[in-house]
Image (cartoon, helix red, strand yellow):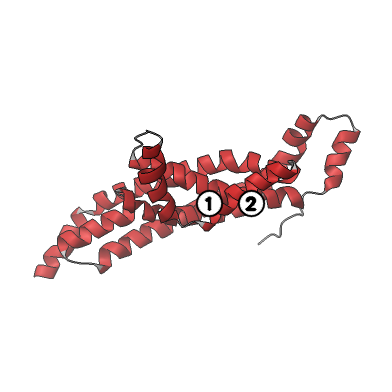
Amino acid sequence: MGDLNAYITLLNYIPYILEGAKWSLVLTFGGLGIGFIIGLPVGVASVYGGRYTRLLLNIYIWIFRSTPLIVLLFLFYWGIFPTIGYKVSPLVTSILVLGLRSGAYQTEIFRGCIESIDEGQILAAYAIGMSSIQTFTNILIPQVLRISIPGWSNEYAGLLKDTAICFILGIQEVLTRAKIISMAIGIALLPYFIAGAILMILSYLGIKVLDIFYRRWSVPGLIKEI
């Protein structure tokens, strides 16, 4: 009877754990947005920038790709921000750190996409009188954005899972709320199973949406029809 009551109580907690999914998405899209704002120009600069520019950007990429996320969260929330005299909320800190880290990964995505484009297209654009800005905005960037979608799908799924680590700053995303529920009702397996199922569904839906965009914007003959 006790277990039955616990399972009934768990049903009442479903809206609570879904509220956590909302914060998981806020962290994910906030991190992706900041990562995109950083990654696209840094990706371009890492290909076309000067020697010292590329060196500095490679240092940024190396630091944020090689440092564990939990260390970055500790470093910014309890180290960097207090040192410079700013009190930043856990939510803003989490989004900023996720964005900086995602920016390092997205830089590599965009850099690979840029390098995959035939240089002859750039030279042809210059040959017909297009300026550098026109070439980048009309020739390079549209292709980069389309080609980068598969890589972006992977980044979305990875970042969604990384949001669970933000519990260390007190963010009550979906996994943290599953832990709170399991402690409250004394059942561990089912709350975590529900949390995992929610994350899997969110990951699947996001990847499918990006796949739809990829196919809609694809150039006929360049991708294999399934």
Mark 2 surroundings within 10 Å by alpha-carbon count, few (fewer than 14), some (14 through 19), many (20 or more): many
Q: Which residue is mark 1?
A: 64
Q: Is residue 45 left or right of residue 152?
A: right
Q: Nearer the viewer, residue 136 or 7?
A: 136
- In this rendering, position of residue 41 left or right of residue 84: right
Q: Would residue 65 be found to the left or right of residue 86 on screen?
A: right
- From the top left corner, tell me how far across and down residue 186 is, in percent: 16, 65
- Number of numbered discs overlaid on the protein picture: 2
Please report the residue visible at 20 percent of the width from the left and 59 percent of the height from the top. 10
- Residue at mark 2 to residue at mark 1: CA–CA distance: 15 Å
Residue ID for mark 2: 109
Around disc 1, counting alpha carbons within 10 Å, would you say few (fewer than 14), some (14 to 19), or many (20 or more)?
some
Q: In the image, what residue type sits under mark 2?
A: Ile
Q: Position of residue 189 (x, y in %)?
A: 26, 68
Under tag 2, what secondary structure?
Answer: helix
Q: Nearer the viewer, residue 102 or 84?
A: 84
**Where residue 139 sits: x, y (%)?**
77, 38
Mark 1 belongs to which amino acid?
Phe
Disc on the earlier residue, 2 or 1? 1
Point 20% across, 67% down: residue: 187
Residue that lies at the very extreme toward the right in this rendered image: 127
Secondary element at image label 1: helix
Query: Where is the C terminus found, in terms of image quarters?
Result: bottom right
Question: Residue at the front extreme?
Answer: 83
- Quadrant in which the N terminus appears: bottom left
Of residues 170 and 176, which is closer to you in this image?
A: 170
